[in-house]
Image (cartoon, coloured by chain):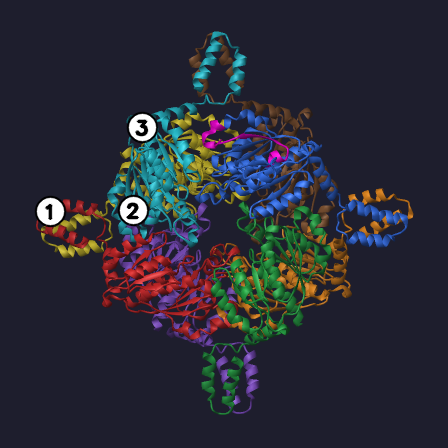
Chain colours: A green, B purple, C red, D cyan, E orange, F blue, G yellow, H brown
Amino acid sequence: VIREQTLALLQQVAAGTLDPRQALDALSLAPSTQSPFATVDHHRALRQGFPEVIYGSGKTVDQVLAIAAELEPHGDGVLITRCESTLRAALGDKYPRAEINDLGRTTYIPPGDPGRVPKGKGTVLIVTAGTSDLPVAEEAAATAKALGDTVTRATDVGVAGIHRVLAHGRDLMNATVVIVVAGMDGALPSVVGGLVGTPVIAVPTSVGYGASFQGLAPLLAMLNSCAAGVTVVNIDNGFGAAMAASRITHGAAIF
Amino acid sequence: VIREQTLALLQQVAAGTLDPRQALDALSLAPSTQSPFATVDHHRALRQGFPEVIYGSGKTVDQVLAIAAELEPHGDGVLITRCESTLRAALGDKYPRAEINDLGRTTYIPPGDPGRVPKGKGTVLIVTAGTSDLPVAEEAAATAKALGDTVTRATDVGVAGIHRVLAHGRDLMNATVVIVVAGMDGALPSVVGGLVGTPVIAVPTSVGYGASFQGLAPLLAMLNSCAAGVTVVNIDNGFGAAMAASRITHGAAIF
Amino acid sequence: VIREQTLALLQQVAAGTLDPRQALDALSLAPSTQSPFATVDHHRALRQGFPEVIYGSGKTVDQVLAIAAELEPHGDGVLITRCESTLRAALGDKYPRAEINDLGRTTYIPPGDPGRVPKGKGTVLIVTAGTSDLPVAEEAAATAKALGDTVTRATDVGVAGIHRVLAHGRDLMNATVVIVVAGMDGALPSVVGGLVGTPVIAVPTSVGYGASFQGLAPLLAMLNSCAAGVTVVNIDNGFGAAMAASRITHGAAIF
Amino acid sequence: VIREQTLALLQQVAAGTLDPRQALDALSLAPSTQSPFATVDHHRALRQGFPEVIYGSGKTVDQVLAIAAELEPHGDGVLITRCESTLRAALGDKYPRAEINDLGRTTYIPPGDPGRVPKGKGTVLIVTAGTSDLPVAEEAAATAKALGDTVTRATDVGVAGIHRVLAHGRDLMNATVVIVVAGMDGALPSVVGGLVGTPVIAVPTSVGYGASFQGLAPLLAMLNSCAAGVTVVNIDNGFGAAMAASRITHGAAIF
Amino acid sequence: VIREQTLALLQQVAAGTLDPRQALDALSLAPSTQSPFATVDHHRALRQGFPEVIYGSGKTVDQVLAIAAELEPHGDGVLITRCESTLRAALGDKYPRAEINDLGRTTYIPPGDPGRVPKGKGTVLIVTAGTSDLPVAEEAAATAKALGDTVTRATDVGVAGIHRVLAHGRDLMNATVVIVVAGMDGALPSVVGGLVGTPVIAVPTSVGYGASFQGLAPLLAMLNSCAAGVTVVNIDNGFGAAMAASRITHGAAIF
Amino acid sequence: VIREQTLALLQQVAAGTLDPRQALDALSLAPSTQSPFATVDHHRALRQGFPEVIYGSGKTVDQVLAIAAELEPHGDGVLITRCESTLRAALGDKYPRAEINDLGRTTYIPPGDPGRVPKGKGTVLIVTAGTSDLPVAEEAAATAKALGDTVTRATDVGVAGIHRVLAHGRDLMNATVVIVVAGMDGALPSVVGGLVGTPVIAVPTSVGYGASFQGLAPLLAMLNSCAAGVTVVNIDNGFGAAMAASRITHGAAIF
Amino acid sequence: VIREQTLALLQQVAAGTLDPRQALDALSLAPSTQSPFATVDHHRALRQGFPEVIYGSGKTVDQVLAIAAELEPHGDGVLITRCESTLRAALGDKYPRAEINDLGRTTYIPPGDPGRVPKGKGTVLIVTAGTSDLPVAEEAAATAKALGDTVTRATDVGVAGIHRVLAHGRDLMNATVVIVVAGMDGALPSVVGGLVGTPVIAVPTSVGYGASFQGLAPLLAMLNSCAAGVTVVNIDNGFGAAMAASRITHGAAIF
Amino acid sequence: VIREQTLALLQQVAAGTLDPRQALDALSLAPSTQSPFATVDHHRALRQGFPEVIYGSGKTVDQVLAIAAELEPHGDGVLITRCESTLRAALGDKYPRAEINDLGRTTYIPPGDPGRVPKGKGTVLIVTAGTSDLPVAEEAAATAKALGDTVTRATDVGVAGIHRVLAHGRDLMNATVVIVVAGMDGALPSVVGGLVGTPVIAVPTSVGYGASFQGLAPLLAMLNSCAAGVTVVNIDNGFGAAMAASRITHGAAIF
C-alpha cells in the first residue's frame, strides 16, 4: 500500500494539485517505507509462502489462539514454536489440519489454500548426537518442513561411536544443508563438517550437567570447530537453525 | 543534497517531464535519505558545532594527519582521542591552535572560525576516585570541553575517606551533570548518586589488579549501584561519558 | 531538626551557658547531619514531590501494606515496584486512587493533596524491541509517570525490521529522554542513539534463551554501543532507567 | 586418648615388654594423631566452649534431630544454621532452652551446664546495607552470640545515604570487629573500612538482580575495596563471617 | 590409491591367489579409507579446485615456504592466512603470480594451470561496521576469491548511522551470501538479516575495549540476533566465514 | 554380522560370482564397519561383561522399563543412573535381583547368568570430603561395583581436619585407583594425590553456595591441583569417575 | 586544624562577635570534618606510627621520589609497594636508612625519630605454598614489619606434601595472625585453617597457568574454604593481607 | 632419618635413659614424619627412580643451574620443564648426557648410574589434533620418557578428517594409556575414547583464537566428553598428563 500511496502523491504532483515542496515534506515525514526492502519483503512472502511465526513460550493458550486467529487468514500458514501440550491440543482442536510435533513442541497450521503451501526447495538433514537432543532437533525439523524443505534425520549419532556417524554416509551426501544438534562436548559438527562439503549449521543444546554450563561448553566447541566453515546458532535454537537452512535453500532458488 | 535531489525530481514530475511511475521507481531505489533523521543530523551539527572525532588508537601518525586534514576544513573542529605522545606532538606542530591534553591523551583542533566554537551549555563535574583514574577522567574532560561544556573537577575522592567526598559539596551542587570515574570497588558513584539529584554517569576503569578483572568489578558494582538512577558507560570510556553528558546539556537546551 | 538542634547549641554558646570546648565535643560526636546535603535532600523532596518507593519483591502483602500505611501520610505519594497481582489487588482495595500497572507490576498511590502531585517536566519516550520486553518497559513507564514525567511509547520496534524504527521519527524527535528496552542482541539502542541527539538510556532485559545468559548478551552489547553517549542501567531495571531519566528532566529544571 | 595410648606403648617399651622396633612399627602405622594439633584442638574446645555446628540445609527434620541428640550431651552447645521454620519449631519443642533466630534461620542450643556457656570476648558490630541483607546478617549475629561474642547492629546503612553511615560513629568506634553485610554494589565495606581501624569482614549477599549475578558483583567489589585491609568471605556466608570474627576475638584472648 | 589397493586385493581373491578369510583380515586392519567419504573428498577437490590452506601464524618464513613448496605442485592453488608482511614479501618474491592482500594478511598462489582456477559460483557481499573491522573482512574477501566466489564490499556501514546501511540496498539484494563483520555491539547482522532473505553469516571481531572482552560482546549479540536464521562463526574468523559462504555457493552448484 | 557379510562378499568374489569392481563399490558404500574397532568393541564387551547403561534423568518410569526390558536379555547386566525413588522401586519390583543404591540414585540389574557377572579387577577407594558429597560418591561406588571393581570408602575426610585424612593411610595404600569426591574448595584431591602414587581421579561436586558457582570453584581448584598427575572429570560425574577407574583396572588386566 | 577552626568559630560565638545563625551556615557549608572519625584518624596515626603508603606501579622514579620527599617529613615513615629495581635503588641512595625487600618489591623508609618507629603488637606468620608465591608473601612481610608487627615465615609448604605443613606446628601455634599465600588450587588455607584457631587471611596468587585464569581458581577455592572463618583478600594483594593483619594486631591492642 | 631418630628415642626409653613421658612430649612436638606416607614416599622413589622436577618458567638460567646442581647428585635424574632455548643450551653444555626436547621445551638429565634409569612400565600413546598442539604433546612425551614409559605418537589427527583417526587403529590398541592433546573444539578425546577401552587423558591446549578463550573451549568440551571415563588435566599441562599416565603404568606394576 505504501507504494500506492506514494504513487498517488506523485500523481497529485503531476496533476499540479500538489506543490513539489509540500510533496517533499510529506515524503520526509512518512516512514521510509519507499525503500526497496519493504517491496522485497512483500514479494518474497508472496513468492515463498513463508508462514507467520508465534513464539509460544510465556503466552497463555487464549493469547496464542487470538494471535493465530488473526494471522491464519493471511494465507501463508502459521507456525507456533515452544508450544506446550495443552496449547498443542487447543490448536489441534481448532485447526484440524494442523500438524503437531510433540517432541519438538511445535504446531504448524498450513495455508488453507493448497496452492500456497510452500514447495520443497532442498533437503535438510538433521543429525542429533543423543536422544536428549531430540526436542531441539524436532523443532528444527518442524520449522524446516513448514518452510517447504524436505527433512531427513540421522539420530543418536555420537562421536564416541564413530561408526554410527560413518553409517550415515549416503544421507550426508544427499543433503543440501546439514543441521547438527549436539550437547555435551559439541564434537559432532566437526566430524560431520569434515565429511561433507555442503553447509553445516551447528546447534548447541543445554543438555548435560556440571561444566556444560547450560550449553556453553558445546557452544564454544562449535565456534572453535576444527572443520572450516561450520556456522553456529544460539543454544537450543532449532528454529533459528531451520531458518538459516531455509535462507540457503530458498536463497539459492532465486538466482 | 538529498532533499534537493528529491525536490528536483518532484519538480520534474510537476513539470510533466518525468512520469510519476518512473519517479516512484527512482525513489524506491534511492537510499532512504529523505527520512527526517538525515535532515536533523545536518541541522544539529550546524547548530551545535559538534566536532568530528578520530579514534587515534591503532592508526599511524600519517593516517591521523591525513584524516584530520580532510575533516578540519569542515569547520566544526576535530577531536582526536587515544592519541599517543608522538601523534600529539605532530598535531601540535601542524595546528598551533590545537589544545593538547597529555594525561587524557587527546588533541582538540577547535574551529578556525571563532564564531563556530561551541558555546557552553552546562557544567560537567568530573569526579575521580584515585590518581590512576585520571587518564580516563581527562579524556572525558577534554571531550566535554570540545563539546562546549564547562568542566569542573574533584580528584582523588575515594569513599575510603568519606570526608573527602563530602568536602566537595558545593561543586556537586553546582554541576548540571556529574561524571564519576572509578576503578577498584566502583563505590564512588553510589555515594555521589546519593548526594545529588542531577544526572550521574559512572565510568568504570581498568585500574586495579587481581579480581578487578580489567574493570569488570567496578563495572558490575556500578550497574548494581544502590543509588537509583545512576547510569553506566563502558570500561575506560571517558569519551563516551562526556558524549552522554553532552546529550543531556545540549538536549536540554533545545526545548 | 538537626539544624534546629545545632542552632540551639550555638545559641547556648552565644548565651554563655555552654562552653565552646564542650560545644565542640558535642558537635564532633553528633552525626554529621549539618552537611549541606542533608539540607538539600530535604528541599529537593519538597520541591519535586518525589514519591517514596517500596520494592515489593520478597515482601508479604501484609508487610507492604504496613510500610505503605506508614509512608502514605508523608504526602509525596508511594510507588510500589515488583508488586505481584494479589498485592496490587490489596493495594487497590485500600487506596482507591491508586494507579495500577499490571504489565509493569507496579502500583502508584499519588499524593492525597492534588497540589503535591508532581508536575510534568519532560517527555520520556520508552522504546521496546519485542513484546516480551514490555514488563520492564512498563515498570519504567509507571515510574516515570509517578515522577511527573510525560510518557510516550514506541513498542515492538526491532532492528530486524528497520522500517519499524524509522516509522517513529516524530516521537524520537519530540522526546526529552529516550529509554530503550531490549533483550536478545541489544542492538536497538545503537540504532536509536544514531538517530537522535537527546539522552538515550539503554535497559537490557533477561528475555531470551541460551547464550543470552539472562541478559548478559544485551548488557554487553549496550555497553559497547557504536552510538556514542548511550548509557546503560542494570538488566531488567526499568525503575532505574526512569529514575535516571528523571534526574535529567528534573535536574534540567533547576538551572 | 591417643596420647594415653602412645604413653602406654612407651611405658611398655620402658618396661621391656615391647621391643623398640615393634614400637616403631606401631607408631608408623597409627594415624599421626600424636601431632601437636590434635592436642591443641582438644584443649581449645575445652577452654572456649565452641558449640558443635550442624548445617541444616538439605537435611530432614529427623536427621537433624538425631544429630543434635548425639552432639548435645558433649556439653558445648549445638548451633544449627540454614534451619527452616518446621525444623526450628521441632528443635524448640525438644530443647526449650534453645534460642531461635527466625530471620537468620538458626537455632542455638546452649550448653546445659551454665558454667560452660561461652564468655563474651569482644564486641562484633554487624552493619547491613539493606533490609534484604538481614537474613545473612542475622545468621552472623546468631553465630557470633553462640560463640560468646557481644553483638551490636547497625541496619539499613546504605552508602547512597551517607549520613546514615556517619550516624553510627559511636557504634563503629566501640566494636572489636565489624562485619559488613551488603549486596548490590558492595560499596559499604569500603566506606566503613575507611572510618575505622579495627578489622572489617565483608560479606557479599546474593540480594539484587540482573548484573548482580547472584552476588558476584558485590563479591568482586569487596575484593577490590579501596579501603586497605578489608577481608571477604563467601557470598551469603554470615556463619563464616562470625567464625572469622570469633577467630579474632578469641585468638586475641590467648596472648 | 586406497581404492586401487583394495581393488588389487579383491582381484587376488577373484584370481584365487588370496583366501577370502585372509582378505577379510587385511581389510579389517587397513585404515577404513574405503569409506565413501574418502572418495568424495577426492572428487570434490578435483571438481572445485579448492586451494590448500596454510595457517601462517606461529610459523617461520622458512617453514611456510617449505610447506608451500610441497603443496603448490598439487595444482589447486595455495592460500596462506595470518601471513605477516615479511612472509607476504617472501612469498611474493618466490611466486610472482601470487595475489597479496595486505590488509587481510593473506597471500594466495593461484593454480599454475589456468584451467584449474576455480570458477565463480556466487557473489559474496562482505559488510563491515567500522574501519577497524577491515582486516577480518579482507581475510574473508581473499579467502572467498581464492575459493572462486565473486566478492563485493560495503564498508563502514554502522547501525548508528542507519542510512548508511540502507544506502547499500542494491548490493544486499544482489548477493548470494552476505558476510557481516562487526565488533562493539555486534548489531549490524540483525539489521542486515532483517533486510535480506539470503544467508547471513556474522563474524564478531575483537575490535573494541573494556566490556567488549575481546569480542565476547558482539559474539553473544550475534548469537542472540533478533533476525531469524543468522549464523555465527568464531571471533575474528574471516577465513571461516568465507569457507561457510563457499559451502553455500558451491554446495548449491552440485544439485 | 558385518564381518560375516564382508566374508560372504569376498567368498562370492573368490567363487567368481561377483566382479571385483562391483565388490569394491559395495565395500565403498557400506558403512565402514569393517574397521578393527567394531571388532574390538565386540570382543571387549564379551570379555569384560560391561553392563549397558541407561541415564534415567528426564525419562519416565515406563520409558526406562521399556529400555531395560530390551537390554536386559543381552546378558551383560544393566545399570540405571540418576534413577529417582519411584523408578528404583519399579525396577526393584520387576527385577528382584536388582541392586539398588538409594543414596547414589542407581539401580543395577546384574547378568542373569552368574558366569557373566564381571570379575573384580582392582580396588577403587572412594574418598569424600563431606556428607553432602555422598550422592555423587555413591553413584561412583555403584558404577564401579557394576563394572566388577572392589569398592572401599573413606567418608567425611575434609582437609580442614587433616588428621582425618591421615587416619586412612592403609586404605589409601591398598587402592588401585582413588576417586576423590569434593565440593567447596576442592582441596582434598591435592592432599590425597600427595600421599599416594596410584591414579587419583577428582570429582568436583556442586555442593556449596555462593562463590562455588555450582561446582566451578572445586572444578578449577582440581584442575590446578598442586599434586602432579591428578585428573578431573565433570562436576557431579560420579559415573564418569568410575568409568575412568574401570578403564585403568580393566585396561591393566589386558596386558 | 579543623577542630581548631571550629573551636575558633565557637569562641567567636561565645564572644558575641559571630551570630549563631551565621555560625550555623558556616558549619553547614564546611566539609563535615568535625565528625568523630577525622579526630580518630588523627589520633590513631599518632599512636600507632602507621607509615604513609605509595603504590609505585605506573609511576616514574621522579614522581615517587617527589611524593616520598613530601611525605617523609611527616615522621611516620613511608612504605613504597610495587617498587621496581631502579626505583628501589634510587630510594636506597636517597634514604640510606631505607629497608629494601627485593623479592617483595618494597622499600620502607622508617621514621627518622626512633621513638616513632612502630612497636611490635603481634606476630604475623606468613605461609607460602610454592616459591613462585614468594613475591606476594614478601610484600606482605615487608608491609607487616613496617606496621610494627613481628614477622615469621613458613615457605614452600604445599598440601601435596602434607608433612611439610605439619612440620610447622610450633610456628602456627605461636602466631597472632596467619597469612596464607597460595596459587594453583588454593588448598593451603583450608589445611592451615583447620589446624589453628587464630585468624587466617588467605591471599590467592596469579601464579599458575591454564585454568588458573590469573588467580581465579585459588580465589574461588579460598572463598569456599571448608575451614570455617578463613577470610580472603584480592589476588596477589600481599599489602592488603598485611593491612588486615595489622587491623587485628593493633585493634586488639586498643581494648 | 626420621625412622632412625625415632628408633634411637625408643631405644633410649627401652634402655631406661629416657622417661616415657618425656619421650611422649618429644614425639608430640616432632613433625609427624613417622607417618606411613613418609616411608612410602621414600621407598617409591628408590624403587621407581622418579626424577626430580624443576619448573623452569620464571627462573633465570643461573637459578636453574644451581637447583639442578643440587638435585642431580640425588641420583634419580632431573627433569626441567618450561625450559627456554638458552637454558636448554646451558644445561646441554653442563650435562652432555642430557636429553633435550626443543619442541616440548624440556631438558632431562638421566641418572648417572645406568642401573637407576627408570625401566619401561607401559606404553603411552600421545595423540595430537594439530601441529600447534605439538609443544604440549612433546612436554608430555619427554616427561613420560623420563618416568620410564615407552612413548608412541599419532600426530595431526583431527576429527575433521576422521579417516586420519581411524588410520591409527593399531597404535590405539597397543597403548596402555592414551594422552590426547587438542585445542579448538577439543573433540578428539571423545572420538578416541569411543575407540579404545584403555585410560584416556585429555589435555586441552590454549591454541586457537577468539572464543577459544585461551583453552576454555576445549577444556569444557573435554569435561563434557560423550565418551564415558575420559579424564582431563589443566590447559597446556602436558607434564601433568604424563604424570597421570605414569600413576597408571607404575601403579599397576605394584600390585
Is F158 colored magenta in this rendering?
Answer: yes
Kind of element beneath mark 1: loop
Res H152 seen here: yes
Chain letter of disc 3? D
Q: Which mark is residue H2?
A: none
- Looking at the rendered structure, whether the residues under marks 2 and 3 are on a common chain is answered as yes
Task: Answer with left or right where residue G63 lies relative to residue E232.
Answer: left
Q: Residue at x 68, y 43 (%)?
A: H127
The crowd level at tag 3 (other Cα within 10 Å; few <14, some 14-19, many 20+) is some
Kind of element beneath mark 3: loop
User: What stretch of residues is rendered in magenta?
Assistant: F143-164
Tally of numbered tags:
3
Using the image, determine if residue H42 lies above or below residue D171.
Answer: above
Q: Earlier in the sequence, mark 2 or mark 3?
A: 3
Distance from label 3 to label 1 (Cα)? 54 Å
The picture places residue C123, in percent across and down from the top left corner, at: 35, 70
- Residue behind mark 2: D155
Q: Amino acid at mark 1?
A: Leu
The picture places residue G77, in percent across and down from the top left corner, at: 33, 39
Nearer-the-camera pick, D16 or D94: D94
The image quadrant of residue F151 is top right
- Residue behind mark 1: C18
Query: Badges 2 and 3: C-beta atoms under 8 Å apart?
Result: no
The picture places residue G56, in percent across and down from the top left corner, at: 41, 45
Kind of element beneath mark 2: loop
Q: Which mark is residue D112?
A: 3
Is F52 colored magenta in this rendering?
Answer: no
The crowd level at tag 2 (other Cα within 10 Å; few <14, some 14-19, many 20+) is many
The image quadrant of residue D139 is top left
